[in-house]
Image (spheres, rainbow, N blue to C red):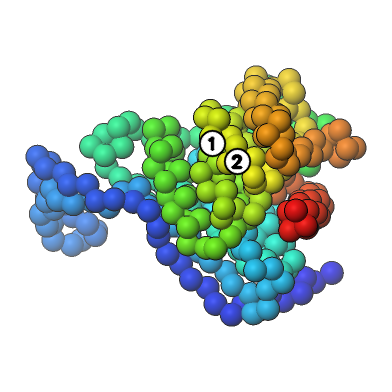
């Protein structure tokens, strides 16, 4: 069945957050910037803009909600996470547009179109790069022993829902990441939220950690937070917890989490955080897909072969959570 057309009234792209940093004492370089061109002198001393976030806002001709959905990606990823899936199906940005939501897809600080900054002059370390082997295991495509450079020799988990033939297309999305820019990322995400009266945040993995942080600081602007397998939860003061408890939270978990050396503690931390929110009267729900009879999902449920089904589950939860909040 051919999906219905999406009618947009506008698309805007912008950067938010960031600051100016001046560097001095840098060496002057002579470089040939294009093949065959004359070399020119480049002076690296001067002012650099750093800590900014890139966002693209897609606005429907006739939105059914006055609250946009902000999509936040995970570590070593960009906003491509929410666009077309590696095997060519509509991504969650399209699925939510078709449900009547305006959407905002962002590249976090240091990722994609947000750009990098010099290191170690501004970023205090070199970036990390994600290997295919790391992604295979961490994203729970299969066991570490099940990975092979030869796609035909790879052994995924039985019933794996990620389109394994397109695993290399997923790896093509990876970008460098730094581990020391959390504060700048939270600040830029908060600045993004401040561009709107009210938002829904849908976040994946590391983005879920940021979403919980921002929700605790900006509860008046956040209608709900949906997290697909957040990478744990930040530590919070009692005041931050009380603020965060005013925002409905949903946590979604795939398969093979509970015995994975990284995901078992991440999930435990997130569950403990949700219990703290509940103890303060907050709404903090979990959809553990294997426990509701949906087996085989990877760390990438927005790309798995049942991604549209999970999106509908999230949309139904949002409808209920926002209706409950309005009634309250």
Q: Residue at x 40, y 60 (%)?
A: 15
Residue 319 in the image, given as x and y percentages of width and height: 78, 57
Q: Is residue 19 above or below residue 198?
A: above
Measured in 3D between alpha carbons, the distance from the residue under mark 1 to the one under mark 2, in whole angstroms, is 6 Å
Residue 284 in the image, given as x and y percentages of width and height: 72, 39
Side (left or right) of 128 relative to 30? right
Tell me the residue that label 1 is attached to. 240
Q: Is residue 114 visible?
A: no
Q: Is residue 134 visible?
A: yes
Q: Residue at x 42, y 32 (%)?
A: 179
| Number of the label disc, if any, that sits on residue 244 | 2
- Image quarter where the N terminus lies is bottom right
Contact check, label 1 and label 2, Cβ < 8 Å: yes
Q: Is residue 119 above or below residue 46?
A: above
Determine the residue located farthest toward the front in the rendered image.
Answer: 328
Secondary element under disc 2, as helix, strand or loop, is helix
Secondary element under disc 1, as helix, strand or loop, is helix
Query: For this rendering, which residue is in front, 34 or 7?
Result: 7
The local crowd at label 2, few if under 14, some if 14 to 19, many if 20 or more residues have their Cα within 10 Å, is many
Q: Residue at x 42, y 46 (%)?
A: 187
Quadrant of the rendered image containing residue 36: bottom left
């Amino acid at each position: 069945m051919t999906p219905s057309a999406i009618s947009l009234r506008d698309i805007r792209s912008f950067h938010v957050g960031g600051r100016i940093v001046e560097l001095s004492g840098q060496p002057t370089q002579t470089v040939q910037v294009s093949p065959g061109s004359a070399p020119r002198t480049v002076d690296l001393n001067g002012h650099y803009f750093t800590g900014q976030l890139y966002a693209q806002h897609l606005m429907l001709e006739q939105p059914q909600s006055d609250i946009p959905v902000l999509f936040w990606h995970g570590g070593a990823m960009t906003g491509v996470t929410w666009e077309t899936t590696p095997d060519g199906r509509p991504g969650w940005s399209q699925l939510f547009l078709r449900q009547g939501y305006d959407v905002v897809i962002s590249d976090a600080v240091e990722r994609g179109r947000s750009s990098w900054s010099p290191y170690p002059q501004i970023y205090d370390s070199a970036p990390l790069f994600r290997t295919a082997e790391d992604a295979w295991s961490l994203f729970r495509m299969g066991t570490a022993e099940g990975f092979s450079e030869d796609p035909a020799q790879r052994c995924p988990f039985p019933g794996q829902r990620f389109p394994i033939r397109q695993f290399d297309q997923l790896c093509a999305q990876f970008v460098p990441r730094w581990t020391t820019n959390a504060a700048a990322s939270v600040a830029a995400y908060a600045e993004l939220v401040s561009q709107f009266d009210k938002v829904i945040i849908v976040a994946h993995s590391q983005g879920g950690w940021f979403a919980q942080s921002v929700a605790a600081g900006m509860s008046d602007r956040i209608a709900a937070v949906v997290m697909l397998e957040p990478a744990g939860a930040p530590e919070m003061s009692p005041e931050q917890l009380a603020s965060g408890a005013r925002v409905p939270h949903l946590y979604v978990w795939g398969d093979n989490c509970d015995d994975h050396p990284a995901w078992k503690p991440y999930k435990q931390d997130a569950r403990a955080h949700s219990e703290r929110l509940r103890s303060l009267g907050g709404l903090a729900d979990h959809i553990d897909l294997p426990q509701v009879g949906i087996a085989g999902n990877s760390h990438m449920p927005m790309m798995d072969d049942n991604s549209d089904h999970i999106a509908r589950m999230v949309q139904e939860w949002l409808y209920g959570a926002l209706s409950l909040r309005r009634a309250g």
